Structures are given as structure tokens and as C-alpha cells.
Image (spheres, helix red, strand yellow):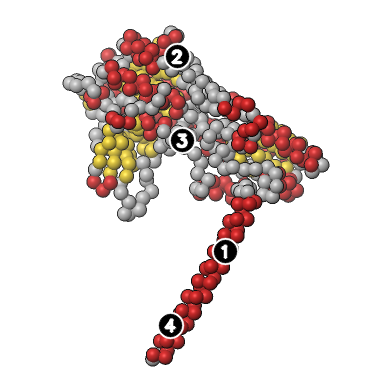
Amino acid sequence: MGCSSRSELKIVNGDAGFVLEDVPHLSDYISDLPTYPNPLQHNLAYSAVKQYFVNTDDTVAQKIVVHKSSPRGTHFRRAGPRQKVYFESDEVLACIVTCGGLCPGLNTVIREIVCGLHHMYGVTNILGIDGGYRGFYSRNTITMTPKIVNDIHKRGGTILGTSRGGHDTSKIVDSIQDRGINQVYIIGGDGTQKGASVIFEEIRRRGLKVAVAGIPKTIDNDIAVIDKSFGFDTAVEEAQRAINAAHVEAESVENGVGVVKLMGRYSGFIAMYATLASRDVDCCLIPESPFYLEGEGGLFEFMEKRLKENGHMVIVLAEGAGQELLAESVRTMNQQDASGNKLLHDVGLWISDRIKDHFTKQQKMVINLKYIDPTYMIRAIPSNASDNVYCTLLAHSAAHGAMAGYTGFTVGPVNGRHAYIPFHRVTETQNNVVITDRMWARLLSSTNQPSFLRCKATLEDKMEEETNQVLDGEKCMNDDNKVVSENISEGTGA
């Protein structure tokens, strides 16, 4: 399962360095497609809106902070309803599938795709694929109507079921073709979006009039290009309960230590934002910022200092943090799950054991440590109000795009505006915390934790800094002498 072919990318170049990375359209490979007036122009819900159709030339800039001399840069096609659609309402047979791990908001996205297609476009034939990608060819479908999905957003999980792997592109497209499905809505993370990309490529190869729309899902917020993934706000909010519990436990006993492990396989956004929101966290550890335990400047030294100052402390760490410290002793490091993700060791348990061992055996200090892992409690809850609104916008943007004939795209906000983004742009890289950015600096100043640079590296930096200061001092002296000489010469000449 690979990424989509980049040989057929739609790139439009304009003035002043403007670049539009466009998404495929059904008309690109099917000629003489008829168009129809958008039913929204007769929809009572939109009758009060003066301009409810997106201009065909509207784009969204990927980079919003620019200098006056900067080129206009990369843009994406703006999401929203178009004046013309490429499907008549009664000819649409749509399907929805959810893949990968659970995430708050899945049911909300499902509900809003169904209700959006039905209420905005009059689509009445919508199927749910049961059990992820393999459900296309091994399970029955579920009929979806507004009545059936009416209150599913109040429940966690996904009513369609989910699974990892099971991606047989040929069988999936055979099923789509045999059932007469012409709109496919795929909800899942980067692995799922890669699968959606090859499904689209096979559909295009066969010349089928089928729109493929992706809705990116990852609780870790590690999908590239888009501002944020749904479920992230809910995860950060729910994580506060675990952090608060750890803080209460820690401050209630002598030398209390609360350790909370949060989601974040490769990206530490949940841990970082939950720490910033809490204000009760003394140390946050994420995959992007390496740390070490023993020696000068290490975690144990910082813990000793903080425990002496406060008598307790709380540590928050992402699940992918510190994996390199235990790579040699863990057999699962090179194993993968069905989605191709590395099977990670429980760093929370490991670091808890190391902390207890260090303080009880080496420091002869009594430690009362409580380890909390709320991962599955967080994943399984329904989305909060913020994510519910966001899921609605994602679902509607996807439906507008598919009805307008766009295909082979994923949808998401870019600088606050929803856009249609080529699959490869959200699957070729991951969104990570940039530890040289101001947000990480804000966290460090909030927790007052060290950056855990190795002593050797710190000393080398210090020596280099001192050397530079000496050189700068010599330069200043030379410059001062030069100025004095010039002044003397000028005085003599006068």
C-alpha cells in the first residue's frame, strides 16, 4: 500500500510566486460529465445567506506569516459548496468507513456526513461499512439515515466498528463497483489516508465516476498541513482529570510522585498542551525532546531538587518519549501492529520502576509513586463541544467537495479556513512539536524544568561561547584601537 502517484499532481502557478496544489476532479479523467444546479440554492437553511457558494478561484494559503518581500507561496483549494454539482441527489449511493484506533468525535463525523448529505443535498442512499477497510469485502453494510444516527454523537467509539490493516485495494474497489457506490467517505489517520489514496488511484485507473473523500483522524494531532485533528481538544481536556488525580495523590503524601502517561506515539502535542493547561505539572517529557535519567542535569537530579522544594511532583510523559533509553532491552521495538505502527514499550511503567529504584536503593529516600495511564478512557469518550463543532465542519466540507466532483482529497482547516488537500501532502510527513519553537519554550517556562541537554553538550556549548566571547573581545579591542588611531590621525590632520 503506497502513496498516490505524484506524476499526475495538479499544480497551478500564478503571479508573485503563487502555487496552487489542486486536488483531482472527476472531469479530469471522465469526459462530458453533466452538471446540475446545486440543491442548496433552494434550501431554506441557506436562503438567508447572501453568498453561500464558494468562488471557483478561492484558495487558502498554507503559510500565513510572511514578509513584504515573500512570494505568495503554496495554496490549497478552499472547501465549500459550489454552484454546480456533478451528482443528482437520487443517483448518489454514498458509503462511510472508519479505520484505525478510536478517537473522540468519530460518531459526530459519521452523523454529520449522513445528515449533511440528506438535509443539504437530498441524498437518501447512504451505507456504513462495518469493520474498517476489510468490511468492504467481508462484512455486511449498515443503512444510514438521519434517524438512525440522530444521537450517536453522544457516545464514544464508532457505530460502524473499526479495524487496522485488511487493505486489499482490488477487492475494495470491486466491492465499490459491484454495489454501485459513487461517493466514498474514509475517516482515519495517515495510514488510512494512504489507503484512501491508492483506492482513489485504482478508481481513476478504472475510469469510475466515484468521488473519494478523506477525513483525517488522529488523536495525537500529528497529521501534517492541517491546523488540528479532531479529538485532540477532547483528549487535552480529559487528560486534566488524570493530571489532577496524580497531583492530589502526590501532594497528599510525603515525597509523592504522580506519573501520567498520555497518548503521543511520535508527537507530544497532547502531553504539551495538557501540561500547559494544567499548571500542576512539574515535568513534561515528549518524543521530540530527548532526556536522560542519571547524572548532572538529568531527570533524577531535577526530581531531587523539586521534591526538596515542594515535597511532591507530577510528571507527564507521552507514550513515545524515552523509547531510545530502553530500546536495547525491549524485544517489541522492531515489531509492528496491523497499521504498520511500532509496538512501543510502556515507558510509564519503565520510568516509574527506575524512579523507585533510584530513590529507594541509591538515595535511601522513601518515594510514594502513583502511575496513571488514562489512554483508553480518553480515546473512548464522546467529543466535547469544541470538537463537535469541528467535526461538523469537516463532514460538511467533505460532502460539499464530493458533490462538486472533487475526489482524491482530504479535508481540514489550514490557517483557520477549510481546504481540500491532496492525499500525499498529509501522508508524506508528520506534524511534530518543534522544540526550538516558542510553544515549547512556554512550556519550559511554565514547568521550570530543564531542557535535559547532556552535560558534555552543555560544557561544549559553554566553552564555545567563552571562546566566542574572547574572540569578540579581541575584535572589540582591535576595533577600538582602530577607532583611536583614526581619531588621532583625524586630529593630527586638523
- Quadrant containing the N terminus is top left
The residue at the point 44 percent across, 13 percent down is: 135
Cα gap from disc 3 to disc 4, whole angstroms? 57 Å
3 or 2: tag closer to the N-terminus: 2
Q: Which mark is residue 467?
A: 1
4 or 1: tag closer to the N-terminus: 1
Q: Which mark is residue 486?
A: 4
Q: Which mark is residue 412?
A: none
Compare residues 185 and 344 and report the one nearer the observer.
Answer: 344
The residue at the point 28 percent across, 46 percent down is: 17
Q: What residue would you read off at disc 2?
A: 134
Q: Nearer the viewer, mark 4 or mark 2?
A: 4
Q: Check disc 2 and report its element: helix, strand or loop.
A: loop
Circle 2 packing at 10 Å, graded few (<14), some (14-19), many (20+), is many
Q: Check disc 4 and report its element: helix, strand or loop.
A: helix
Circle 4 packing at 10 Å, graded few (<14), some (14-19), many (20+), is few
Q: Check disc 1 and report its element: helix, strand or loop.
A: helix
Cα gap from disc 3 to disc 2, whole angstroms? 26 Å
The residue at the point 70 percent across, 34 percent down is: 352
Q: Which mark is residue 430?
A: 3
3 or 4: tag closer to the N-terminus: 3
1 or 3: tag closer to the N-terminus: 3
